[in-house]
Amino acid sequence: MPNTQTIPSPIGLSIPRVDAVDKVTGAAKFADDMQFGPGLLYGRLVRSPYAHALVKKIDATKALAFPGVKAIVTGADTPGYIGLYLQDRHIFATDRVRYIGDPVAGVVATSEEIAEQAVKLVKVEYAELPAVFDPLDAIKPDASILHPDLGKYTVANFIFPKPGTNISNHFKVRKGDVEKGFAQCDVIVEGEFRVPQIQHVPIEPHIAVAQAEQSGKITLWASSQSPFAQRNLIAKALDMSQGDLRVIAPYIGGGFGSKAGVSMEACAVVMALKVRGRPVKLRLTREEEFFCGFVRQGLVAHTKIGATKEGKLVAMKTEYYWDAGAYTEYGVNITRAGGYSSTGPYEIPNVWADSYCCYTNHPVGGPMRGFGMPEIHWGIEQLMDQVAAKLGMDARAFRLKNCLKTGSEVVTGWKMHPTGLSECIEKATAAIDWGKREPASAPHKKRGKGMAIMWKAPAMPPNAGSSSYVRLNEDATVTVGLGGQEIGQGTHTVMAQMVAAALGVPVEWIRIATPVDTQYSPYEWQTVASRLTWSMGNAVVAAAKHARQQILELVAEHWNEKVADLDIKDGNVNSYRSEQTLPLKNMVVYGLPKEGDCGWRGGPIVGRGNFMPTYVTGLDAETGQGPRSVVHYTVGCQAVDLEVDTETGQIEILRVAAAFDVGKAINPDQVRAQMEGGVVQGASSAVFEKLELREGKVRNPSFVDYRIATTVDMPRQIIPIIVEEPQDDGPWGARGIGEHAMVPTAPAIANAVYNAVGIRLPSPPLSAERVFLAMQGKTDDRFAGRKTKV
Amino acid sequence: MSQHEITLHVNGTTERATVPSNMTLLTMLREVLVLTGTKNGCAAGECGACTVLMNGEPVNSCMVLAVEADGAMIVTVEGLARDSKLDKVQQAFVDLTGVQCGFCTPGMLISARALLDRDPHPSEDEIKDALRGNLCRCTGYTRIVEAVKQATRD
């Protein structure tokens, strides 16, 4: 149990980021800033122009003859499968392509310009196949099958593909008795929701540089959230040892999940193998970034919810059809997470849920901030508002009545751990004066308030681990080895605080060993799932405590005292018994001299530690029930106060309050910064963003046509609120926040728009055009629930 | 592709280079002068990550040809700090957490610098307007705007 009585400094202090000075001076090195010398070669990819086709023939003779071209690679050079949870992907297409943009060949040349020209000279012969562009079409019995070999793919044991179909995972919940449950309900509400694909839009596009030696050793420098996962997945696909593939990942210019797992980095490695001894740089253009890496999956959701007239939720039936794209090696777990989270953060005794991961000839769906939670909460939170309205209950009161409390049974059968969800609801809504009808700022504007709540658990294998070492230098500065990436979330700063507190030194003495380098850094599963503060935090604390123990044992022996009477504070070892004191410097490397010049004791201090949850159980394949499905949940609430301009349909957010239960805010300012960033990314996804897919082609792969929030789109006021209900196995009670702030924003805005002007759209974005047309009673057929073609 | 000899003044230093006609100022800064602080986010003049000062005006360096910068005074993020002392906007970004991933930061700082050089006491709306061409995906902009405001105070 965390000792919440004495929280050592600097836990809970908002110290400045440890990387801020490097970043404001331009000194921070990102992958494209690294210098590789005049031998650097450049790669560009030949990509399929067809959504679904067989690859009949590739003729690269003209391209190879082009001056400056050094090599061409194709799927024939690397026929192995690759994938995180399901190995359904080739690095370069072999017999078929499954989305517009699917890499078919790679050109390596002395400049990017030459490589780009040579790409046009590669002749590929395709035979088009019927394509599938909607998950509801993908599941039809006569649908074109994207992966005929689905039954042969290696798959994690908690994913259930249906061979012979386009369903690569089917997650089920069968809890209680939904039919009996609905029969008890006085109010039932049903809805269909369609969430389109969006993209992460990190300001730094994907980039990888790879170099392979004749010895077989490979080095990969990449803007990667997951150097160890990249090492593992690529090594497996190439049938080589993880020990011979070194991945180095410097600062990342934004990830949001786009740089998790593996995507284009594997292409760079295969290209490097053809030009041994020379580094090959592969960069995505901004246009490619929109559809050639990962996108957030689309979702078609049918959901039915019922409650008694007392306002108690009794039953829910839901089907999710995920538009998961051409390869679902990562997306299958989003399907699972969506399924086991399908109730939202509520206690509902009778649940029937089916979550289907559907192959479509669309860009590859993958992890994006929230991992399925924003997509499912869009529908859930709007339906909850509708249930409350039908009951004549205030939306806030309805949620306070039904939301998870400590000990509530969650959808998978586990009991909710101590949680501050009710406190989040109370504080977020109070911050925008919930219940008070306030006037709009002009006669042509309408003002409304809305709210939404959320939950999310880190979605990962049950044995995702973290490790760390803590090494002291001569002047007692502390070098901390870790494998988690600084993607902007502030993790390196928070880790420095934790080591300082656990060891007993000023935080200014901490040096995080960057860049993460799989040759020297200790293992970290991935920088995803908002898991680092909790998981890597536990590992660095264990390593710091191990170092501390070694130091105390050394000094105890030196002073002939007991370890229990000693402490380390501000970089000095102190005895409470004899009141002696000794600074850490020098002894942590050179040890201490024995009396009478008779030798030395001690040696260079290196602490090590790791953390891996040991208690996560499986879930029954038929019922989705299990003793403990996840490690923990972060919960929260957002409340939005906005105006709709009835002349233009534009939405202006006046206030948005965001309250999340983070267990313990190690650095409160950084936690608030995550909430602010998540709110704006969530609002941007609610109001602006959609990948306009037509026949498999993304029509808007540029910043002109895919709008993201700018300074002039900011909410007028963002009110971040920290709630702390400690996590039993988190460092000082901490759990994650990175993803959660984006999850409830879109439905909170949708609910506020309904409150203002009485309209709901089944799909985001709530663009000015669509809101305006809806207010006129016109719905654009392009966006309405799609009529399935029979 | 013809080559041109150009001379430009970057962060107070005179630089001479021979560049092809179609090389952008961004590429010249990053690859010829190896000033990698200025970033490439889109190569299309839309994200602002490549913003530098050219004769005092903020420009998207990916949209300026190197040959157009012949004779120009260029300031990049590397030119803001002096003798290890951060300028006021940089210090404010550090103190108020105006930085997360840091990729948009160099462009943001240059746009902010251009604004404050033009108008030492802008309103909040003027700050937002000056930075609307610098996209940020991490911070939500609140602290960036606060940091620019902070830099206007003594």
Image: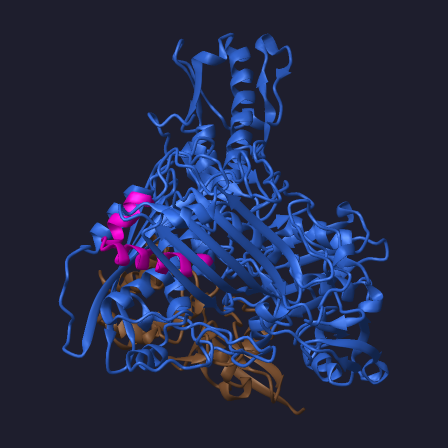
Residue A693 in the image, given as x and y percentages of width and height: 55, 77
* Farthest bottom residue in view: B2
Q: Residue placed at 41% from the left, 63% from the top?
A: A191
Report the predominant secondary structure element of the magenta stretch.
helix
* Residue B102 visible, this orientation: no
* Colour setup of the view: by chain
Residue A273 in the image, given as x and y percentages of width and height: 81, 63
Taking depth in this image into account, of A205 and A386 the one nearest to the observer is A386
Q: Is residue A400 magenta?
A: yes
Residue A467 in the image, given as x and y percentages of width and height: 60, 37
Q: Residue placed at 40% from the left, 9% from the top?
A: A578
Q: Residue placed at 46% from the left, 53% from the top?
A: A317
Residue A199 in the image, given as x and y percentages of width and height: 51, 68
Horizontal arrangement in the rendering, residue A703 relative to residue A229 (left or right): left
* Residue B1 visible, this orientation: yes
Where on the picture, by quarter, is residue A238?
A: bottom right
Quarter containing the C terminus of chain A = bottom right
Q: Is residue A208 magenta?
A: no
Say if B19 sits above or below A160 in the image.
below
Taking depth in this image into account, of B140 and A69 the one nearest to the observer is B140
Say if A289 sits above or below B59 in the image.
above
Horizontal arrangement in the rendering, residue A22 relative to residue A36 (left or right): left
Where on the picture, by quarter, is residue A657?
A: bottom left
Magenta part of the chain: A376-402
Shown colour of chain A: blue
How many marks on residues? 0
Horizontal arrangement in the rendering, residue A641 relative to residue B39 (left or right): left
Shown colour of chain B: brown
Quarter containing the N terminus of chain A = top left
Say if A523 sits above or below A2 in the image.
below
